Amino acid sequence: MTIRGAAYIVGAFEHPTRFAPDKSHAQLHAEVAAGAIADAGLSKADIDGYFCSGDAPGGLQSLLNYLNLEVRHVDSTDIGGVSPIVQVAHAAEAIALGKCNVALITLAGRPKADDVRTGTTPRIRHAAAPDVQWEYPYAIPTAVSYALAAQRHMYEFGTTSEQLAWIKVAASHHAQHNPNAVLRDVVTVEDVVNSPMVADPLHRLDCCVISDGGGAVIVARPEIARKLNRPLVRVLGAGETTKHQAGGKIDLTYTGAARTGPIAFAEAGVAVSDIKYVSLYDSFTITVLLQLEDLGFCAKGKGGAFVADGNLISGVGRLPFNTDGGGLCNNHPANRGGITKIIEAVRQLRGEAHPAVQVANCDLALVHGTGGQLATRHGSGTLILERE
Amino acid sequence: MQPTGRAVPAPHPDAESQPFWDAAAQGRFLIKRCTSCGEAHWFPRTLCPFCWSDKTEWIEGSGTGTIYSWTVMHRAKPPYAVAYVELAEGPRMLTNIVECDLDRLHIGQQVELVFTPTSGEDTPPVPMFRPIGG
Ligand SMILES: [Zn+2]
């Protein structure tokens, strides 16, 4: 059994706001849900499956209550910001098994309005968790966790800050065309490496933005997708995992993508070289570099050379990525960016990306996310999508 | 004045970790080793994370190791260092590096244990590390 071809992404919507002090958190979920169902050309009554994750205020039950949805399938899988990416696969599984026909996945938040600086301020959450009790006395904000991985990668493979900076440079080239992006100025390698150090070796411009907003997607069974007046975006394959400290044998040079990539490519029946566009989680520049290596776009340790010289810039390089500007420049709602990764891949496959960044004949895209804390425990999800 | 320059929150002992923190309060650094498979692990668990045997024992750690990776959190005032230290017994442990020159930290640097007081009342100290020889 496989999810290959079992479901289609028929609706996608990204909230245009990046600062929402005048909106409630639940309201943002409702607005993106309504946006996605309208984009699909379906109605609220068609939704019979609902998926949300750790950003949902009050969790699944409160949001179903608030949205007034009556569904027959629910999923609140939470492995960090990647969650919506693995939930697309879970929705396809549920559809394949006949558990639902039209699945709604939402993500939304207002960390900007709430002044939540999760990247640089340690927050003690789940102090009694079996592993967290051994971490929080040491004050590990998110940026520190990713910096530890970047530092080790530089030591083992000679990766440089200038190479990491190219990832931000590429994102900024794309963001200049996105009127909703938080950061729209094109930056240079020098701008990045000269920005203030946050946590060695990550500079301020190696970090993603903090923004409010959110997004939603609708996943539906093939018979429904074919009746809608939208380009067909088919789910081809997926992989999911978590990576952790392994009893003390942790290796910071790779991510869970090393496991999820091969699983997703095998299910999709396509090769790395077939992929025309990638949406990669970009909480930090190092996140992108590690994922590229682990997914097989280049050899382990060669990510620095791969991303340099504009190789990720649409129309310039070999592998266009995050053409909306990504989390690095455009949007990282709820301090979780998984949903925006799916949405830009759908835009690319439909041919609805900004003309300046639209990839020609974009018929195969890969979406990958890394959620949580890279250096302690993180979730990973890969999704391969095809325009039919 | 804390050696870290910041208040260190007290640990959160539970039934499983209490022996570790009781020993820490006496200045002893314990780690767990499995007598079935022979592997030491971190953080301490009752069941060995490698073979799930319950034949694990507390042993006195040497308190020495080398830095596997490090960073300095510059946005904090004052900045502080976080590292994975590879203990002499094998496991890699997330910790802080204290009593050090933040500009001279490097991977492979040899470090030794230093217990650092925590901010609670009668709460145990937490294990941190400092460069050997300053
Ligand atoms: Zn064992």
Image: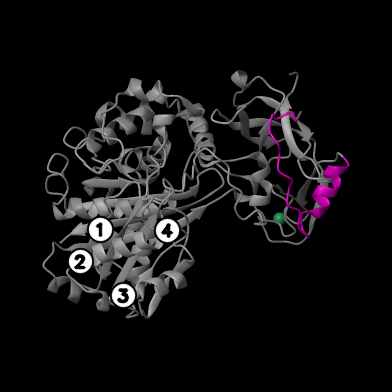
Q: Which residue is mark 2?
A: A38
**Circles 4 and 3 on the same chain:** yes
Q: Which residue is mark 1?
A: A13
Q: In the image, what residue occupies the spot 75% across and 30% down? A: B2
Instruction: Say which amino acid is labelled 4.
Output: Glu
Residues in magenta, as a range: B2-26
Q: In the image, what residue occupies the spot 85% across and 43% down? A: B25
Q: Chain of mark 3?
A: A
Q: Secondary structure at mark 2?
A: helix
Q: Which residue is mark 4?
A: A240
Residue A384 spot, x, y in % from top left: 28, 56
**Quadrant of the image where one finds ligand 1:** bottom right
Q: Dot 3, how many residues are within 10 Å of its Cα: few (below 14), some (14-19), or many (20+)?
A: many
The reply to whether callout 1 and callout 2 are in contact (CB within 8 Å) is yes
* First-in-chain label (3 vs 2): 2
The image quadrant where one finds the N terminus of chain A is bottom left
Residue B17 spot, x, y in % from top left: 77, 54
Of discs 3 and 2, which sits in the foreground?
A: 2
**Circles 1 and 3 on the same chain:** yes
How much space separates mark 3 and mark 2, taking CA atoms?
Answer: 20 Å
* First-in-chain label (2 vs 4): 2
Residue extending farthest right:
B26
Horizontal placement of B70 versus B11: left or right?
left
Q: Which residue is mark 3?
A: A95
Residue B95 spot, x, y in % from top left: 67, 37
